[in-house]
Amino acid sequence: MNIGRKLWVYWRKRPYGRKLASQVADALGQLHYDHVDYCGTGFFHRARGYIYDHVYDGYPVFETPGGSKEAIAVFPDRASFVDWLSEQSDWSLSGRDQDNPWYFDNQRITRARLKGLLAGQNPRV
């Protein structure tokens, strides 16, 4: 493995940390893509807490008629969401834990998207 590849893997596996996670929790309404068909994964802040789920046609699966009533993860409060998100990384949220490689890095949550949210950029591509 060359040095460039090692640095890339290191960067992708670097946890987001508490500072970024706290800022995201405070700024979050929703972060997801909004277009036809599969839109990757997204974060949503709802009455029931902070939610991480797949998104289809711009809607989280747990809110779509006939969709799964269970999200990928639900965090009932800010503290639990921040604890979890602070330990995540581009690698852990990349979808590489899925059996189907089609999900790998397919419109996933990344550090760049989190920082874009904080900068007021929430593209609805």
Image (spheres, rainbow, N blue to C red):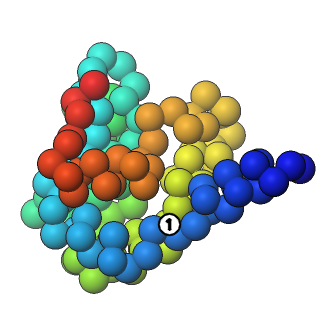
Tell me the residue at 70%/57% (across/down): 7
Tell me the residue at 42%/55% (across/down): 111
Tell me the residue at 52%/70% (across/down): 15
Q: Which residue is mark 1?
A: 88
Task: Give the secondary structure at mark 1.
Answer: loop
Q: Residue furthest top?
A: 36
Is 107 located above or below residue 93 in the figure? above
Q: Where is the C terminus found, in terms of image quarters? A: top left
Q: Residue 20: x percent and y percent?
A: 33, 70
Is 37 located above or below residue 72 in the figure? above
In front: 114, or 36? 114
Q: Residue 62: x percent and y percent?
A: 28, 44
Q: In the rendered view, does 6 fall on the left or right side of 50?
A: right
Q: Residues within 10 Å of mark 1 (few under 14, many from 20)?
A: many
Q: Residue furthest front?
A: 3
Q: Residue furthest left?
A: 47
Q: In the rendered view, does 30 fall on the left or right side of 105?
A: left
